[in-house]
Amino acid sequence: MQRIVGSEAQPQMPKSALLHGVSVSLPIAPAVVKRAAGPFAGSAPAASPTPPVVGEAVGPAGDPRFRQLVGDAAWSELPAAVQRRFSKRLGADETAIYRGQVLSTRLSRAGRVLAWMARLIGAPLPLVDGATGPAAVVVSENPLLGGQTWLRIYNRPGSFPQAIHSAKRFQGPTGLEEYVGCGIGMTLRVTVEDRALVFRSADYFLEAGRWRFTLPKFLQPGRMCIVHRDRGDGSFDFGLQLCHPLLGRLVVQDAVFRDV
């Protein structure tokens, strides 16, 4: 049995869909799904301090990993809602969920070719030019993958929804990587710009076990930029752009999400 605990009630979205995806990935105070747990039958529960509220930031810092990537000064420029969202401490049995709408998706001809080629590694880019409609994002903690797993689900009229999965790993030369599977990922630099949290790709890599190889620039698909901007009404904008130095903008996607 599961119960859903939300930190604050949110107004409902009107009906109307990477990350990096790449990222797709893919984050105000998200709702949390927690499995019911209890002591074994016939045993007495051990005394323990009152636990923190599920999914809430623990102490003044909560989960400090994103804050450490940008520094305290830049972090203080972010709206409180963004700080709460990116400092949630998720347990092994907790999941943060966001639902919303994809407002627009634009793929150039080269972008469509790249998106379909990328299906070989799990389809981390949106596949349909002009796609809009319902979308959902599910975030959970996965220590075995080195950080958080992100699942993005995008509606596709007349077809099954597209599911994009990736892992945000807090490691590497920039402190954060987006891993999409099949040994492929990208390093990310995180900044705060105009009160928004911005993720930009630094490099792409291939890895197999302990072996790791950074792709030369001419083999990289372009620079990925993802912007998370709070709207101030309990929702946030998600913007994704993949730009190639010679081919221009390959993928542009805009969406709006809120907590479940």
Image: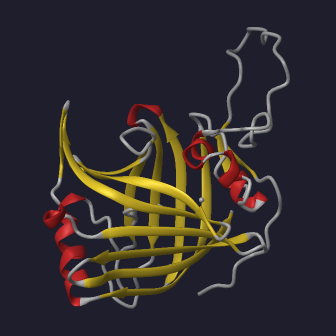
Q: Quick check: 212 above or below 235?
A: above
Front residue of this view, candidates 94 and 117: 117
The image shows residue 234 at horizontal and vertical percentages of 76, 69
Does residue 176 lie above or below 130 as drawn?
Answer: above
Q: Is residue 1 visible?
A: no
Asked if residue 145 is positioned above or below residue 168 in the image, the reply reads above
Q: Is residue 239 visible?
A: yes
Q: Choose between 72 and 39: the one closer to the eye.
A: 72
Residue 249 placement (x, y as % from top left): 32, 83
Q: How is the image coloured?
A: secondary structure
Residue found at x 74% / y 53%: 76
Q: Residue at x 45, y 77 (%)?
A: 155
Q: Look at the image and tell me in which quarter the C terminus lies.
A: bottom right
The image quadrant where one finds the N terminus is top right
Q: From the top left corner, tell me how far across and down residue 255 is, in percent.
A: 54, 78
Where on the picture, by quarter, is residue 51?
top right
| Residue drawn at point x = 73 percent, y = 52 percent | 84
- Using residue 223 as the reference point, say whether residue 83 is left or right of it: right
The quarter of the picture where residue 111 lies is bottom left
Q: Position of residue 108 (x, y in %)?
A: 27, 88
Total labels: the figure holds 0
Quadrant of the rendered image containing residue 173: top left
Closest to the observer: 29 or 93? 29
